[in-house]
Amino acid sequence: MKLVLGIVAALMLLLPVVSADYLYLYPQSNTSYSEWTPKGCSLNYQCVDENPINTNDFVYTPYDDELDVYDFSFGAGGFSGTINSVRVEYYAKRYSDTHKHVNFTLVNWGSKVESVKVMLGSSYTTHYFTHYINPVTSSAWTWFDLQSLGAGVRSISEGGGFVARTRIRVFYTP
């Protein structure tokens, strides 16, 4: 019985979580942008891919202009309908009182789009940015777009922080 529960739990970490009219995507691998330091895991994406959130492993940096992006590529087999929005969610906190600013980053088809400057607080908090259209193509999201999707974080001036989870929530109408 324990073996079966262990296998089911492992599969839940690898597969997208599907609910009524949305699905969650979790990081599948690192990208070429892996400049933050992993703590509690060997690869950066493994530190931010949990469900539920685990703050015992995370990525962090006290330095400016470091970028960490994770691959969320998703084969949309079995899904259809209209994508209403793509929301990137981060569970993050500041590195220190003087290292606290980041930009959250979305990557699609190799192009990066960054959020406005975000000042992180002293406690972990969920931050999210919703994109109603694909900011790279300026068109409605398609299931094909999800095959080349990445998200992450960049430390900027007075930058630095801890990120314990990054996920993407796709809202759609079946």
Image (spheres, rainbow, N blue to C red):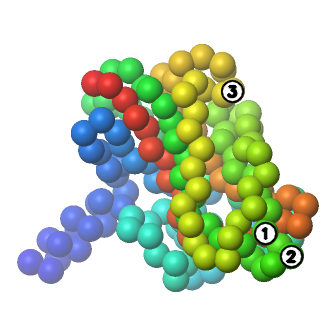
Residue 12's place in the image compared with 160, above or below, is above
Q: Which residue type does callout 1 highlight? A: Lys
Q: Are marks 2 and 1 in contact (CB under 8 Å)?
A: yes
Residue 160's place in the image compared with 169, above or below, is below
Q: Residue at x 52, y 24 (%)?
A: 141
Find the distance from the CA under tag 1 to the CA under tag 3.
27 Å
Q: Is residue 34 left or right of residue 62?
A: left
Q: Looking at the picture, how far across and down is residue 65, in whole percent? A: 87, 59
Q: Residue at x 62, y 67 (%)?
A: 92
- Specify the quadrant that holds the N terminus: bottom left
Residue under numbered circle 2: 98
Q: Label 2's element? A: loop
- Specify the quadrant that holds the C terminus: top left
Find the distance from the CA under tag 2 to the CA under tag 3.
32 Å
Residue under numbered circle 1: 100
| Camera-side residue of 22 and 46 | 22
